[in-house]
Image (cartoon, rainbow, N blue to C red):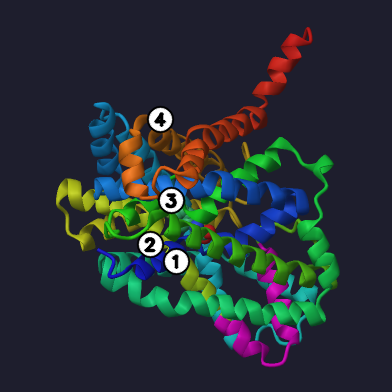
Amino acid sequence: MWSSKLAFILAVSGSAVGLGNVWKFPYITGENGGGAFVIVYLICVFAIGLPIMMSEVLIGRRGRRNPIATMRLVGEEESGSSKWQLVGGMGVIGGFMILSFYSVVAGWALAYIFKSATGAFTGTNAAEVGAIFDGLTANWPVLLAWHTLFMAMTVFIVARGVQRGLEQAVQILMPALGVLLVILLFYSISEGNFAEGVNYLFRADFSKLTWDSVLVALGHAFFTLSVGMGAVMAYGAYLPASASIPGTSVAVVFADTGIALLAGLVIFPIVFANGLAPGEGPGLIFQALPLAFGQMPGGVIFATLFFLLLSFAAWTSSIGLIEPAVAWLVERYEQSRVQAASMVGATVWVLGVGSVLSFNLLADFKFWRGTIFDNLDHLASNIMLPLGGLLISVFAGWVMCRNSTSEELDMGTGVAYSTWRFLARFVAPIIVLVIFLNSSGFIGWVQGLSNGG
Ligand code: PFF
């Protein structure tokens, strides 16, 4: 059990706030043209992500087991069918896939702690920070070493168990990351091209938005909140019966969104002031931020601290990615936590080698969405998470009876509860479905047919 409601909020925000907010949100916003993408992302977060997060916590607390067993148990209880465990199973696999590339990027953050501390960025220009980043990603043995270290750190903390492992660390370091971002915001306001950054982030030009970008925004809403794969369900399993699910979920969603927007407000003004390209790709923050750190007084300390906190945020998120699988092995096969965490960690590590090589030896090996790294990200984040989320909301909204959900949510039967139920039953599933069908080209195909080909 979590020792308090605050501990639970911190742990779920620890899982939610991570590379998704600081690394992924700015770079995919840049790749998808800014403002309109951000609006779609925000709509997805509040209209879909929030109700699904509440659904996951309530299912988790009802089942009180790992996501697979929880879905089986609650599924049998509510509908007599054990098939719902497949949703938990898909989540476990999605978590594996995400962690495999997540760990590689977290490895970049770890590497940057040392680069920052040794003053590698002091006085550098845009070309030089670009060369430092390219130099790192080109060197596969070094990337592999950082990936290995990060996976070892993840296995270590998960093996220690929920309370001792997670709680203590999250309480200080998460707020510290927020404070550091606020300090950086002041730098961006005074030294960056703040007006252009804000304009880029919030001025929506929907004419440029494609269905593919909408799918990326949807996928990111799931990714950033850690929902759709049972991670939050696994955390909900340890939530005391007295804690309020709506209250905690709302707090987490606001904290997560706040950190992402803050990161965007820090990064884009620096990007524009230095003539970097917003659509630069996964290296965006690893180039924009060192440039800023290299120019500011005390930059070495700020940079070191920043990458330390970013690595830490990635660490607390990686726990959420691996916990469903570990909890499943422990409960189903009666393995020790150490054994289970090591086994899962080793499997994820092997998968991660594909992402390590995507930036060097296999950089030209492209299919479907791009490199192995791009494909793992797209399949897990933009397809499996939304699909998992869709099934979870259908489960909570349609399969579970009203009494069970209203009892867990404890919101009474008034407007708040009805709003949640409406979002879970209709809004979330329908929007996810519409986005899936459009981005896969299915709707265009049907329209083509009805227009006579
Ligand atoms: N929400 C994390 C981030 O934004 O970095 C990523 C993540 C963690 C996704 C845990 C899913 C998860 F279960």
Q: Looking at the image, is 432 positioned above or below residue 314?
A: above
Whether tag 4 and tag 1 are in contact, CB under 8 A, the answer is no
Indicate left or right for 72 with 390 as reference.
left
Q: Nearer the viewer, residue 107 or 442?
A: 442
Mark toward the start of the polypeptide (2 vs 3) = 2
Residue appearing at x 51%, y 36% in the figure: 422
Ligand 1 near label 2 (Cβ, under 8 Å)? Answer: yes
Mark 1 / mark 3, whichever is N-terminal: 1
Q: CA distance from mark 1 to mark 2?
A: 9 Å
Q: Which residue is mark 3?
A: 351
Q: Are marks 1 and 2 in contact (CB under 8 Å)?
A: yes
Tell me the tag on residue 398: 4
* Label ID, residue 319: 2
Q: From which residue to which does the magenta span run?
A: 283-305
Cβ(mark 1) to ligand 1 < 8 Å? no
The part of the image, by quadrant, that contains residue 182 is bottom right
Residues at marks 2 and 3, CA–CA distance in whole angstroms: 17 Å
Rendered residue at 76%/66% (across/down): 268
Closer mark to the observer between disc 1 and disc 3? 1
Kindly identify the amino acid type of the residue bearing the numbered disc 4. Trp
Q: Say if mark 1 contacts mark 3, CB within 8 Å.
A: no
Q: Mark 4 or mark 3: which is in front?
A: 4
* 43 displayed left or right of 3: right
Between the C-alphas of marks 4 and 1, the distance is 30 Å
Kind of residue indicated by mark 2: Ile
